[in-house]
Amino acid sequence: MATLVTFHAHPDDESIATGGVMAKAAEEGHRVVLVVATKGEHGEVAEGYLDDGEELWQRRVAETMASAAVLGVARVEFLGYVDSGMIGTPENELPASFWQADIEEAAARLAAILIDERADILTAYDEHGGYGHPDHIQVHRVGLRAAELAGTPKVYMSTINRDYLQRSMRTAAQAGAPMPGDLNPEDFGELGVPEHRITTTVDVLPWLDRKRASMAAHASQISEASFFLAMAPEMFAGAFGQEWFIRCGAPPGLVETDLFDGLA
């Protein structure tokens, strides 16, 4: 059996981007490790949601542990940086923010975990972090450098198949599925990457219930009334039933259906 390390920016990112492959890997007997760069200190939370004296990061750490249990994660580590907030916010400039982190120093922290785990596979994000969040971009930079330092054999960039997602949303809308809020399929045009760049598409429909439960574990950020969980079941399956990756250094024309393809 192999070891998969998934590297994410904030609590709940693991559920949305790689919850399916994590649950699949764990069920198949592989070791699954989750590393989160920050504790999501600057997420939004409804007034009165937290207990008296409770900080948001404390709740989000607890939610991460609950999510990890749902997905079958064997080890959870936080890399020790602070949530950078969105582009242009003051949080971006704070010295402790992940966005301001020295790449080599942060990569060394992650590489130590990769080496300790003898990781076979690392997932990070694509070069613009899926949707441009500074911490997601930093995950890409730090993750790929850490894999170089650790000599991790297989490295994947988690991404979004924007072409598939737009087709799926249009099909659901044409079929009369209720669309949350004012959702427009064209809104997904800047997410992820074009379909031709994707090397690896993993069908996670058999693990979709666990992926959804993992997302729901992050209730401070993803409530049952949220955009994600308010989707009709067929729309949720269309949006989250596959997970997409770009394998770093892949030979031309590579098409995979599993992160563990080719491992002994």
Image (cartoon, rainbow, N blue to C red):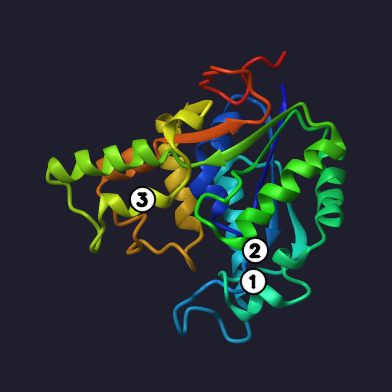
Marks 1/2: CA–CA distance: 6 Å
Q: Position of residue 220 (x, y in %)?
A: 49, 68
Binning the other alpha carbons within 10 Å of mark 3 as few (below 14), some (14 to 19) or many (20 upward) gives some
Question: Mark 3 or 1, which is nearer the eye?
Answer: 3
The residue that label 2 is drawn on is: 61
Give residue 250's quadrant in the image: top right
Binning the other alpha carbons within 10 Å of mark 1 as few (below 14), some (14 to 19) or many (20 upward) gives some
Say which element carries label 2: helix
Q: Locate the C terminus and report the quarter of the image it occupies.
A: top right
Picture disc at residue 180: none
Q: Position of residue 148 (x, y in %)?
A: 82, 36
Say which element carries label 1: helix
Mark before the other along the chain sequence, 3 or 1:
1
Q: Residue at x 77, y 72 (%)?
A: 96
Position above or below: 122 against 103 = above
Marks 2/3: CA–CA distance: 29 Å
Amino acid marked by disc 3: Phe
Picture disc at residue 188: 3
Mark before the other along the chain sequence, 2 or 3:
2
The residue that label 1 is drawn on is: 57
Q: Position of residue 149 (x, y in %)?
A: 86, 39
Q: Position of residue 203 (x, y in %)?
A: 44, 28
